[in-house]
Image: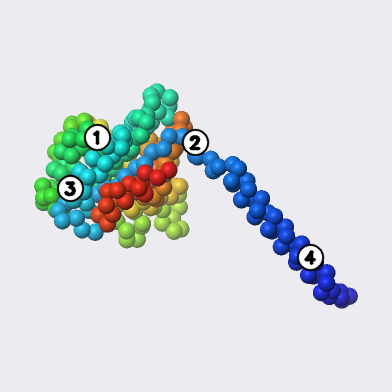
Amino acid sequence: MYRCYHSGKFVSFLIADILILVLFLLGSNVVKAIMPEQKPEGIFLPVIMYHSVTTPATGDYHVSPEMLENDLQYLKNHGYQTVTSSQLLDYTKGKNTLPEHPIMITFDDGFYNNLSQALPLLEKYDMCAVVSIVGYYTDITAERDPHMDAYSYLTWEDVKELQNSGRIEIGSHTYNMHNNSERAGCSILYGESPEHYHMVLRDDLTLLQDRAKEQTGTAPTIFAYPYGFTCRESVPVLKELGFTCTLICLEKPNYITRNSDCLYGLCRYNRSPDLSTEDFFEKALAE
């Protein structure tokens, strides 16, 4: 059976649909105007990601000592106070309060200049930071060619000096999964079973945990994903090994609640030398 096509009815239906859409859009705008957007629950925590502190500062992962000092001075002048992962964990468990304007400063990869250049500035401005090391770099690369600001990595003696300063929390950046070849950082491979992945990740992270404990007396409890590559299969292993906080590279605000799960996957703003201190923090400190 065929239905007859009535153009008048079609136009009527079309006009009715358009009117409904217009009323819906107008209604949505009225609701937005009457009810302002709700802020997320929790305490706003910006996290800044640095890498190397060198002169000259080239590429996306190097800043000069002068730029780092400008950044720290800016934060100090605007009332920001640095926090450690242990302070955050205690807060989630109801054991303490956080500063009015908390901020976390992190350095990835474990460059020697984090000791020679960054530490004196952190001391000058009464701040602390997280330095996440790659075990292979510390065990092998640093020992072959130590103590050059431009390219060297931290030796275990350097790591102990940072830790003993009381300003630096040592984090894990994997033992030897900081690469982007077959496997993207420490993420699971396509088609890899969760059981095999857990074994590979556990073996790598345990090696750095053991080496850190041997050399410094303590094992890291904060973990930075290489390149920010994450996967949900990594979380059980990280928790099993005692990591209470993890860092990624997504540039978004964080909100700290009384639930410790909020510390897994803290977002960070990468500090490249392309922006002035004012322009960078206008972005990184925006809620």
Q: Amino acid at mark 4?
A: Phe
Between discs 3 and 1, the one toward the N terminus: 3
Mark carried by residue 13:
4
Residue 11 vs 44, above or below: the answer is below
SS at mark 1 in the image: loop
Q: How many tags in the picture? A: 4
Circles 3 and 1 in contact, beta carbons < 8 Å = no
> How far is disc 4 from disc 2 in space, using C-alphas?
44 Å
Which quarter of the rendering shows the C terminus?
A: top left
Residue that carries the numbered disc 3 in the rendered image:
66
Q: Label 3's element? A: helix
Taking the view exactly as shown, the residue that stands out farthest to the right is 1
Q: Residue at x 13, y 43 (%)?
A: 116
Amino acid found under the numbered disc labelled 3: Glu
In the picture of the structure, the residue carrying the numbered disc 1 is 127
Q: Position of residue 26 (x, y in %)?
A: 65, 53
Q: Point out the tag, 4 or 3, that comes first from the N-terminus.
A: 4
Of tags 1 and 4, the one toward the viewer is 4
| Local secondary structure at mark 4 | helix
Q: Could you say which quadrant of the image residue 3 lies in?
A: bottom right
Residues 79 and 271: in front is 79
Q: Secondary structure at mark 2?
A: loop
Q: CA distance from mark 2 to mark 1?
A: 26 Å
Residues at circles 1 and 4 in contact by the CB criterion of under 8 Å: no
Q: Amino acid at mark 1?
A: Met
Identify the residue under disc 2.
Answer: 41
Q: Say whether disc 3 or disc 2 marks the residue closer to the N-terminus.
A: 2
Name the residue type under label 2: Glu
Give the percent coordinates (x, y) of residue 62: 22, 53
- Quarter where residue 77 is shown: top left
> Marks 1/4: CA distance?
66 Å
Which residue: 71% across, 62% down?
18
